Image (cartoon, coloured by chain):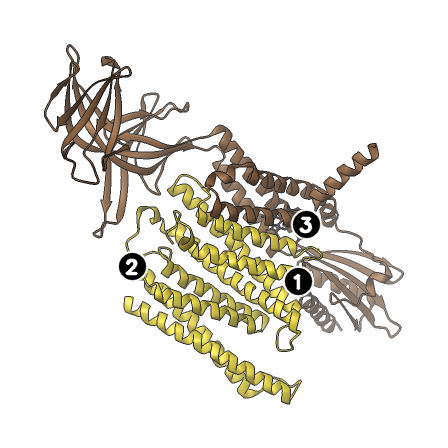
Chain colours: A brown, B yellow
Amino acid sequence: MAKSISENIKWLWNLFASMKLAVILLLIITSLSLFGTFFAPVAFFHTGWFLVPGFLLMLNILVCSFNRWQRIKTLLQGGKVRQPEAFWSSTEGNSMMTDLPCMTASLAAMTSDVLKKRGYRVRSESCSEIVYLAADKNRYFKLGTYVSHLSLVLFVLAFLIGSAFGFRDTGFIVAEQETRFVGHDTGLSLNLLSFTDAYYEDQTPMDYRSEVVLYKNGQLVKQAVIRVNHPLNYEGTRFYQSFFGPAVRIKFRQASQDDLTISVALPAVSASQGYQRPVGSLVLESAGLSFRFIGSAVNATDKIVPKDQLAVEIWQKNTQTGIHILEKGKPAKASGIEITYLEDIQFSGFQVSRDPGNTLIWIASSLFVLGMIAVLFFVHLQLWIQIKPLPTGKSRIYLRLAAPRGFSQAEEMTRTLEAIKRTVESHP
Amino acid sequence: MADLENLSLTLSLVTILMSMILSVIAFINQQRSARTQSGHAVSGPLMLWNRAAIAMVVATVLLITLTIVSRAVQTKHGPFSNMYEFAISFAWGIVVAGFIFRWRYKTDSILNIGLFIALLLLIFARVKYAVPNPLVPALQQSTLLSIHVASAGVAYGTLTIGFGSAIMYLVQKRRNAPWLPELELLDNISYRAVVIGFPFLTLVILLGALWADIAWGRYWGWDPKETASLVTWLIYAAYLHARVMRGWRGIRSAWLLIIGFAAILLTFFGNYIFTGLHAY
Ligand code: HEM
């Protein structure tokens, strides 16, 4: 029983160490992504159907990396220099042989020089007049595989950090001349001085810009212009220009109190009887009232709330106490309070977010690219050489090269041999 | 400038077509001479056809480059604002990559598949011609987007060459044709194409994510075009791993490259298929 458990664990370990699982998981995730794009809402990518294979892939990477370490370590140190005789009898395309008019020892020295000039690290051993050389190149770049694969795990980590410790508010609305708290323990509040939308002659959008002032715990900390592609970043909290819409300035006058002028955004839409009207609401604590402002329709000529007029519903607790139509610039009395609809302004909609994982995402991205370039473009080469004396007084040199598939091995060996020959010829 | 742009685009259509015709003639001649004087070096007139074909390819590269440059002079930004501009960049990537691979591996068959696809893209561009329009706010990120699209041109271009070579591989596997390059060479060309294309594909996605982060405040949002590019990337990642595995070399790897190319097309033409933030 105990044996079968350890066998099972071993089986699982080997499964997760295998590249086959990697390819299968990659193809499964590919298919799921396609499915998600065509047949499912975006939320699909946050369900177990997608996350579980992703998690398995990460596990696959970790186990695989761990499993490979012994081989990589040997490779970095450099394996055996002296290879058995059978090794040299290979007839595969990755070996070459030639006879040169030179003593074994000096040929070995020259070969070693040539290899070093060509960027190889050379180690040598000799045994009964035969010299063995082991040379390798770019061995440290082999570590790039770790850099690139572990950076993929960092991506996931960055995403988790972002989800756990960050926030994202996609509908942070501030009307012109209004200040709003950002919340989420930031201590920040944003004041919108003005919003401008500009268009080209053909009415396509040219620019959306919000002039803002940022306060932290009531202290002014930054004044900036937020535009698309130019977010405001303060201590990791970022504000993006996202959308905009109508707003109104309203003046309230209550008995024995100072006048109060407030900006009210009308971001919602109320659809009734074919009219689409912008709607916004406001709570006036000092009067114990709440208001719902309804603008003139944007999709048709409004007969009930004409242009330059504003409907207002007044609520006390949960009961509506009245509905009035306000004319621009004319004070109106309602529920014991005087309300004036002063002017039309705009509101700006921001996305506010803080993502502590963001920097890590770009670090992981850079690492992935660097690791991949290291492996793909600085190919690890391992060359074994045997030099032995011939009865004729010449020496025979064998070369055997190990390189990844796709690398032009014959070319590398021919060039190396040519260089050795030239050196031999230039030394009488 | 608009006239120059139109003229060079039209001329590039002519030269690309000519280079294909000349390659075919060179190829047929090569067949004949191979049959009559087997084993002999390439003869004079044959070289001539080949050279003419190559001259036409060079002319095509220059003309497409001229089209892109004269367009950029008018719009004052890189070719990233619509399908017309992007199709031309894609075609440019294919022809340049094909030319370099032809020179490096001394075989034209792969270039020809590429040329055919580039021709289709240029025709598509011609049909989709769009007058230069000013940029909407989200696109006012010229440097980033220019590099994004240039990388896409290189990535898609080289991966198209890899696709051509994979097709040849499958044909060669069935036919064992002496007039096609050897299996090993075809496999190597595909692999080299991915070795260059994959890092650029990675760059395309990362720069896209960086732009999304700056413009929309999120680096990834599962937008259909984003997801399609991820799918493409995953397929080529699978290829890189499959190639090192026994049983997945050769035919299966070649199929992965063909599926990968289908994914590129899906990403490229995706905005006609699904709606998303990418209008291009
Ligand atoms: C999203 C998942 C993955 C991606 C994007 C990816 C990417 C890559 C890339 C770009 C290469 C080539 C260059 C380099 O080594 O850096 C590579 C090679 C490699 N990958 Fe992955 N990989 C992934 C998952 C895995 C997994 C799960 C394993 C474990 C089985 C794995 C094992 C390897 C190995 C062993 C190599 C070296 C192959 C060789 O010797 O040529 N990879 N991978």
Q: CA distance from mark 1 to mark 3?
A: 16 Å
The mark nearer the N terminus, 2 or 1, is 2
Q: Is residue A194 visible?
A: no
Instruction: Look at the image and tell me in which quarter the N terminus of chain A lies.
Output: top right
Q: Are marks 1 and 3 in contact (CB under 8 Å)?
A: no
User: Residue A152, relative to residue A179: is it above or below?
Assistant: below
Do the residues indicated by labels 1 and 3 lie within the same chain of the protein? no
Inspect the image, locate mark 3, and give the three-letter code of the amino acid beneath it: Lys
Residue B188 shown left or right of residue B228 in the figure:
right
Do the residues indicated by labels 2 and 3 lie within the same chain of the protein? no
Q: CA distance from mark 2 to mark 3?
A: 49 Å
Read off the chain for label 2: B
Q: Nearer the viewer, residue A106 or A183?
A: A183
Residue B175 is situated, as x and y percent measured from the top left of the image, at: 65, 73
Read off the chain for label 1: B
> Mark 2 = which residue?
B132
> Mark 3 = which residue?
A20
Residue at the far bottom in the pictured view: B36
Q: Nearer the viewer, mark 2 or mark 3?
A: 3
What kind of element bears circle 2?
A: loop
Residue B121 is situated, as x and y percent measured from the top left of the image, at: 42, 65
Residue at the far left in the pictured view: A330
What kind of element bears circle 1?
A: loop
User: Residue A104, relative to residue B32: is it above or below?
Assistant: above
Instruction: Tell me the quarter of the picture where residue B56 sits.
Output: bottom left
Q: Kindly identify which numbered label has been placed on residue B250.
A: 1
The answer as to whether callout 2 falls within 8 Å of ligand 1 is no
Q: CA distance from mark 2 to mark 1?
A: 45 Å
Instruction: Tell me the quarter of the picture where residue A60 sits.
Output: top right
Q: Nearer the viewer, mark 2 or mark 1?
A: 1
Residue A303 is situated, as x and y percent measured from the top left of the image, at: 14, 35
